[in-house]
Image: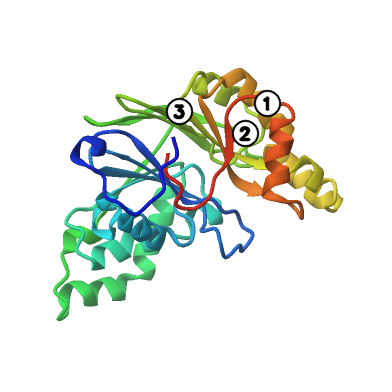
């Protein structure tokens, strides 16, 4: 299922749904992992989930692997799971950099309550930059700087000829509005947990999916942290053993570990913790992996 290489996809392959892991990191500043961001690519069209730091440059790297719809000018549709900074720091980059690089359409954003306020303030902060780029010698396309933002509730939030997207609420500590997403195409059901702790609602929506991309922390590693962090992570995030229980009920064809919090252990030991209680197919996600 994993595709790695530098060859371009054929036209026939372009019609198949591909999942590209653009960023699999967390708030920890790991130089090998960009911030949380994923791309669904189908029929040479890209749909981005979350926009952590490094999103546009990781997308550019994926373009070099044969995904032309991930070049900056083609980044036009974004879905945000929740408004934690590690999932949204790249929002200004995703709005503005493709506009500079000849995007020919507005960017359309779907996110929780608060997304409109966030995008409004980004545009206000960069107002002088935008004015100079449009009205100055650069002669930028004003339409590329337009932002269409929809604040979402649980249920179907998007549909076109390639894909339907359903949002479902998850438990992420004190966040009132945190979502996971189901991306349904003609050949794949791909589910993103977003950030969350154990969620019955996720189990309901993710049942029998092809791919479940789920956040996780090391149960063994968390025990080494102070009580403050144990309280926080156990309330906001999902342990390896909780995830194993989730996967047993969901029965995905493939479970991808994402936003891995190792807390001084290793990615391999994190994987082994999950596999000690779950016998299905499971892998550690890494930036630029393709499924």
Residue situated in front as seen by the camera: 136 or 103? 103
Identify the residue position indicated by label 3 in the image. Answer: 154
> CA–CA distance between discs 2 and 1?
22 Å
Residue at point 38%, 56% (across, down): 119
**Label 3 element class:** loop
* Left or right of residue 81, residue 74 in this image: left
Tag in front: 1 or 3: 1
Identify the image quadrant of the N terminus.
Answer: top left
> CA–CA distance between discs 1 and 3?
29 Å
Residue at point 21%, 29% (across, down): 161
- Which mark is drawn over residue 267? none
**Label 1 element class:** loop
Residue situated in front as seen by the camera: 186 or 51? 186
- The numbered mark, 2 or 1, whose residue comes first in the sequence reads 2
* Left or right of residue 139, residue 227 in this image: right
Q: Position of residue 261 (x, y in %)?
A: 68, 49
Q: Position of residue 56 (x, y in %)?
A: 37, 60
Q: Is residue 255 above or below residue 59?
A: above
**Label 2 element class:** loop
Q: Quadrant of residue 60?
A: bottom left
Q: Position of residue 276 (x, y in %)?
A: 74, 30
Q: Is residue 101 above or below residue 77?
A: below
* Left or right of residue 113, residue 142 in this image: left
Binning the other alpha carbons within 10 Å of mark 1 as few (below 14), some (14 to 19) or many (20 upward) gives some
Identify the residue position indicated by label 2 in the image. Answer: 171
Q: Position of residue 148 (x, y in %)?
A: 28, 48
Identify the residue position indicated by label 1 in the image. Answer: 278
């Amino acid at each position: 299922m994993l595709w790695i290489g530098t060859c371009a996809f054929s036209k026939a392959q372009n019609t198949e749904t591909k999942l590209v892991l653009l960023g699999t990191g967390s708030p920890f500043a790991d130089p090998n992992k960009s911030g949380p961001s994923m791309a669904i690519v189908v029929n040479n069209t890209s749909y981005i989930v979350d926009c952590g730091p490094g999103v546009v440059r990781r997308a550019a790297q994926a373009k070099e692997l044969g995904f032309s719809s991930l070049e900056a000018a083609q980044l036009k549709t974004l879905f945000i799971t929740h408004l934690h900074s590690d999932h949204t720091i790249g929002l200004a980059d995703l709005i503005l950099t493709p506009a500079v690089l000849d995007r020919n359409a507005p960017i359309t954003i779907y996110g929780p309550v608060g997304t409109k306020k966030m995008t409004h303030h980004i545009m206000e902060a960069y107002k002088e930059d935008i004015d100079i780029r449009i009205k100055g010698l650069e002669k930028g396309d004003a339409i590329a700087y337009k932002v269409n933002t929809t604040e979402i509730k649980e249920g179907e939030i998007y549909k076109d000829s390639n894909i339907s997207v359903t949002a479902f609420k998850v438990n992420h500590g004190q966040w009132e509005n945190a979502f996971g997403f189901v991306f349904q195409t003609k050949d794949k059901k791909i589910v993103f947990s977003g950030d969350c702790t154990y969620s019955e609602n996720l189990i309901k929506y993710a049942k029998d999916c092809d791919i479940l991309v789920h956040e996780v922390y090391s149960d063994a590693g968390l025990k080494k942290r102070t009580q403050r962090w144990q309280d926080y992570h156990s309330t906001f995030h999902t342990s390896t053993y909780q995830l194993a229980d989730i996967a047993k009920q969901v029965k995905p064809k493939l479970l991808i570990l994402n936003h891995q919090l190792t807390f001084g252990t290793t990615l391999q030991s994190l994987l082994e913790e999950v596999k000690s209680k779950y016998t299905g197919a499971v892998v550690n996600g890494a930036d630029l992996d393709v499924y």
